[in-house]
Amino acid sequence: MVLTFPDGSQREFKQGVTGFEVAQSISPRLAREALSVTLNGKIRDLSAPITESAHITVNKWDDEDGQQTFWHSSAHLLAEAVQELFPEVKFGIGPPISNGFYYDMDFGDYKVTEADLQKIESKMLELARTKSVFERIEISKSDALKLFSEKGDPYKLDLIEGLEDGQITLYKQGGFTDLCRGPHIPSTEPIKAIKLLHIAGAYWRGDVKSKQLTRIYGVTFPKKSMLDEYLIQLEEAKKRDHKKLGRELGIYLIDSMVGRGLPLWLPNGTLIRRTLEAFLREEQVRRGYKEVITPHIGNLELYKTSGHYPYYADSQFDPIQVEDEHYMLKPMNCPHHHRIYSSSLRSYRELPLRLAEFGTVYRYEQSGELNGLSRVRGFTQDDAHIYCTHEQLKDEIKNCIDLTRFVFNTFDMQVDIRLSFRDDKKDKYGGEAGFWSRAQAEINEVADELGLDYVIAPGEASFYGPKIDFIIKDALGRKWQVGTIQVDYVMPERFDLTYVGSDNQKHRPVIIHRAPFGSMERFTSILIEHFAGDFPLWLSPVQMMVIPVSDQFATTATEYELQLKEKGFRVETDHRNDKIGAKIRDAETRKIPYMLIVGEREVEQQSVSVRRHRIGDLGSLKFSEFIGKVSAEVNNRENPPKQK
RNA sequence: GCCGAAGUAGCUCAGCUGGUAGAGCAACGCUCUCGUAAAGCGUAGGUCGUCGGUUCGAAUCCGAUCUUCGGCUCCA
């Protein structure tokens, strides 16, 4: 049989050779560092016999598959330590994740606190040093059921119920045996550095109605120095946190007297937001959108017609009674726009009709979900609804994708694209199945025609239609949905929307809901973290600080300031009675893109000494040259220079 | 909503096992007139998240509650 290596080379091996033996045949060092093998994309134990020709990768720590194996085994080590310290604990599941692993466990009435993590960590290290071998055991379903009912592990029994006889395996290391399909690293030996990061509640099988187990998150490394480096990286990431920078840079504020999840936009944040809105508005005008404005509340009947009420009743603020009518704080803008559409007889010649609004909506998000600007109870969508014919649909979807990609490319942001489709096992969806399959097919075709790199996520659709979601990671690697494009065949029915076609007959339009930023609040949070607060010049609340070397040059400094303001720049002059070093430091801390130092030389030569934030002294420029340079930077919406 | 953690000056934090609240930065005033990341001196600023309890005495111990953070669930 022939094994093909990642570099394309092939070698003959006898059937039944193990991954470890293959590694040994290459080099003793590889054999020493090997954690697992990947055969045709599937991860296997190093000790598993290889029975047929395949593509093989011997996974070391540097390989993602190797890390996953390492962390999976670490989860078992965590469970073993917990079993030793808390013999009564029942075990759920313990998988590897992108940055470590977790294990869900039932501690009964015992409340696990962070003090326990220390003890468990020490026990894990102690057990790792015993270099226990991970032993794979194949077992029949009946024996597995018997074993875990004797052990008294109800969650494991629940899992075994869902497995087929003949494919059940256990892994045993030291005194701990777990139901597990594997694979694992050969022994606990390489686990040298361990950090248990936090405790969380997690429902069994992710179901709120099930018991809440205690989840312990951790991360492990083969070297202590790697753990130290990881923890430093975590600290660095926290410095980009929009909640921290949002306060330091005066972007927004959440005030408990105003209310949870109700951000107050401070002057700097408002400047950024209005600039973003102007940017998108300009682009939308170019692309044939028309802007509308609708109120913040609407009659309850509106939402009954749309179906949002009572479908989302428990995530909306309760209706307000006025005289004999009930009104709701609007949880979305679409119904209002639909009524604008149906306010007059529409001809096919008017379509596509694209109605846009920066519309503020209010949703009653669960208190535990609120998070800075990322998850709030009042936010503004850069919403638009496109009413079009079936024939126009694909082109309109393409336009929306193009606009969304244009927006994210402007900021050099990396977005993941998800096609959110229905899950036929769930019954939350409105409309006829035929509409759904048609809409999903159309979305898929467009995505393929544009060559998008996407994943399909069944079950992520909204109740009225499938969508294309744009997803971005924050500083801590958490994923947030920003932009979205949704195809809707349901609302035209519910609102009885029609247009008169060229055949003089009434037809149903299709609606596209789309929001490139998604929410101004969430997008701003991502923007802050993406740039770590160092905004591009065109978005910076204060673009330049004029710094006179001493107050002898205050007049020239003020003249420069006024001239720059005249050109439309946002400028301040630092007239404080401080040394220039202090003023520069202050401007750097405030992340102001340009500092203009004005002293004797500059006054004589009608020049400025230019310093760029994070970069340093750029030398002297004629004042007029400087204006040309920064005007271009703003007009081209240039991103800040990468450096440091 | 649920699990865990945290709330002391505008910000960052100290305050050990209960004995009348402290620093740095920021702010304000004065002095210095200064060349690319922190000049010097001084002033002011806190009912220690809130409410209740234990105690002669609570920032410190106990309970409740509010808010924030890390997760789970949810997300039109």
Image (cartoon, coloured by chain):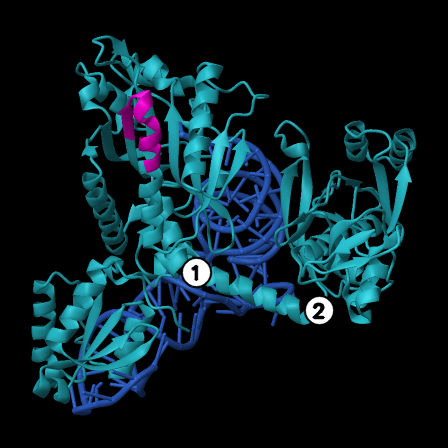
Chain colours: A cyan, B blue
Q: Name the residue type under label 1.
A: Arg
Residue A91 in the image, given as x and y percentages of width and height: 77, 40
Q: How many C-alpha atoms fall within 10 Å of the one at disc 1: few (<14), some, or many (≥20)? A: many
Mark 1: secondary structure: loop
In the figure, is residue B16 to the left or right of A641? right
Total numbered badges shown on the rendered structure: 2
**In which quarter of the view is residue A261 placed?**
top left
Residue A388 within the magenta-colored segment of the rendering: yes
Q: Name the residue type under label 2.
A: Lys
Residue that label 1 marks = A240
From the image, state whether disc 1 or disc 2 is nearer to you. 2
Residue A269 within the magenta-colored segment of the rendering: no
Front residue of this view, candidates A37 and A260: A37
Front residue of this view, candidates A111 and A369: A369
Chain under label 2? Answer: A
Residue A21 in the image, given as x and y percentages of width and height: 86, 60
In the figure, is residue A637 to the left or right of B19? left
- The answer to whether A547 is drawn above or below residue A264 in the figure is below
Q: Which residues are magenta?
A: A385-398
Whether residue A46 appears in this view of the structure is yes
In the figure, is residue A398 to the left or right of A88? left
Which callout, 1 or 2, points at the residue further toward the start of the chain?
2
Residue A47 in the image, given as x and y percentages of width and height: 86, 54
